[in-house]
Amino acid sequence: MMNQYTFDNVSIDKASQDVSDFMQKYKVDSKSNLCFRLTLEEILLKYAKRFGEQAVFELKCVKRFQRLRIELSVVGEAVDPFENDAESGNILPGLVSTMGAYPIWQHRNGKNIIVFMPQKEPFSQTVKLIFGIVAALVLGGICQLLPAETRLAISSNFVAPITDTFMGLLTAVSGPLIFLTVLGAITEMGNMETLGKIGKKLLSFFFVVSILMGVLHLFLMLPFFGLRFGNGGRFELSGLLGLLLDLIPDNLFTPFTEGNLIQIIIVAVMGGVAILMLGSKVSHISTLLTQLTYMINIIAEGITSLLHFLVFGVILDMILGDSFAVVLQFYRSILVIMLVTALLFPILLVFTVLRRKVSALLLIKKVMPVFLICLTTASSSAAFATNVEVCTKRLGIDRKLVNFGLPMGTMIISPGHVAMYMGISLSLAQSYGIATSPFWLILAFIGSFVLASATPSVVGGTLVALSVLFTQLGIPGEAIAVAAAVSILLDFFATAINMFCVENLLIEVSAQMNLLDEETLKSDIM
C-alpha cells in the first residue's frame, strides 16, 4: 500500500486509519495498534505545524521477509520529530520502541523519511520451547535404541556442530546487544547525578538481597552433609585477587571475541560514564547509539525466534552423548542443591504476589519463556533479548531501568550459582573427609559469592573458578573433574533460578522508584 495525503485533520485521520487497518490485517496486537496510531498522529500533527496543512506526505506500508515496514516520507527541510523539545519532550522513541517498532528518522534527497517496523503478534514462545524440549526427549529416547558408537557419531558429526554454530551466532549478537543496551541506558540518564542515584539504589538492593539468599542457602544445605569439623580452610588472597583482576579486559575487543559478559558490561559502564562526563561535546553519539541498538535488536529478534531449535539441539546432544552418566553417582548431592536452590522460586513468587497484588499463575506464565530458555541452554545471554521483552512488555518495568538493571542484575544476582558452588564444596568435603570449621564455612560462602559473579563467561571459566575455590578450602585438585561434570548439569537450573530472581527484584525496585506500570503487570498481556 502506498498513498499520498495532505496535512489537514481529515487526511491525517484517514492516513492513521489506513495504517491501523494494515497492522490489523497482519495481526499486530490491538494495544500496540492503538498506541502506534496515536503516535503516528502526533508525528503528523508536528509536521503539519511545521509545513502547513497543504503540504503533502506519503505513506508506504509493505510486508517484506515476514516483517512489516511502514515508511513515512515528507518533503522539506530536516525535521526530526523525535528530537527533544519543550512542547512534546523526547517521548516518541520510547513509546514506539516499547511496542516493538523501531523508528528510524533520516533526511535524504530533500525528504524526511521515518521507517517503523511494528511486530506481528507472535506465536507463543513458551509453546515453541516446550515443543522443542518434548521433540528432543522423544527423538533422544528413540536414539537410545541405537549402538553407543552410532549415537556418539551423530552427536559429534551433526548435532553438536550445528548447536555450537547457533550458540556462537547468538553470543556474537548478544555481546554487542548487551553493550549497546547498557551504554544507551547510562547515556539516557542525562547526567552523573541521576546515574549515581539510580545506580546506588539498584546495586545496593541487589547486593543485600543476594547476600541474604546466599546465607539462606548455606544454612539450608548444612544438615544434608555429614561434615567432619576440625581446623579446615586457609585463605589465599592471590587466587581470588587474580580472578577479580581478570575481570578487567586487556583491550576493547577481546570481551566481544570471547563473549565475556562481565567484561562487556564493564566496558559499557566505562563508556557510558565517559559520555555523560563529556556531555554536549558528544551529543551526536546518542543518535548513533539509538540507531545501532535498533539494528542489533532486529538481528537479535530474528535469531531468538529460532531459539526452540537451539533448545532441541542442546537437549538432544546431551542425551546422545550420555552426559548424565558421569554425575549419577552424585545424584543425592545434586538433588539437595537443586531442592535448596528451587526454594527461592516460591519465596520470591509469594513476595511479589503479596507486594504487587498480582496473580501467581499470571506471573509464572509471563516469565516462563525466559525461564525455559535459561533452563535448557544455561545461558543468560541467550535469554537476554527475550528477557528485555518480557520485563518491558509483560511486567511493565520502565525500559530505562530494564536496560541498565537487567545486565547489572545478571552480573550480580547469582544465587543459583552461589548455591551450586557451596553445595559442590560441601559434597566434596564430605566425600574426601576434609576437616571443616566455622572459618571454612565462611570461606566457602565468601568464595562462592564472589566467584558466582566473577566467573568468566568463557570456555573453561567454571573450571578456573572451581580451582580457585578448592585451593581456599583444601579440596584436592583431582576433584575438579567430578565437580566440572556436576556443575555442567547444575548450571542449567542455576541460570534459570538466577533470571527468575533478577526479574522479581527488578519488579520490586522499579516499584520503589515509581518506574513500574502495575496495570501492565496485572494485565493478561503476553
Image (cartoon, rainbow, N blue to C red):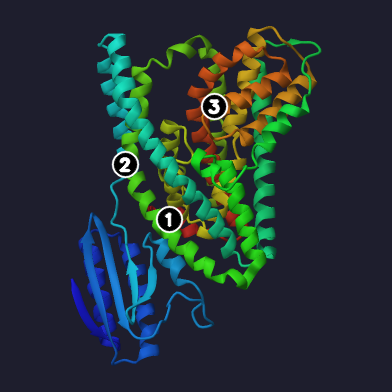
Q: Residue at the spot x=32%, y=31% of the render? A: 162
Asked if the residue at tag 3 contacts the one at tag 1, i.e. Cβ–Cβ closer than 8 Å, the answer is no
3D distance between C-alphas at marks 1 and 2: 20 Å
* In the rendered image, the vertical position of residue 251 relative to residue 404, given as above or below: above
Question: Residue 306's mark?
Answer: 2
Q: Mark 3 sits on what residue?
A: 460
- Residue 388 seen in render: yes
Q: Amino acid at mark 3?
A: Gly
* Marks 2 and 3, how far apart at CA: 27 Å
Marks 1, 2: nearer the viewer: 2
List x then y, in percent, for residue 509. 61, 52
Q: CA distance from mark 1 to mark 3?
A: 36 Å
Residue ranking furthest to the right: 231
Q: Nearer the viewer, residue 234 or 458?
A: 458
Quadrant for the N terminus in the image: bottom left
| Residue 354 visible within the image | no
In the image, residue 19 above or below residue 85: above
Image x and y of residue 239, in percent: 72, 27
Q: Residues within 10 Å of mark 1 (few under 14, many from 20)?
A: many
Q: Which residue is mark 1?
A: 393
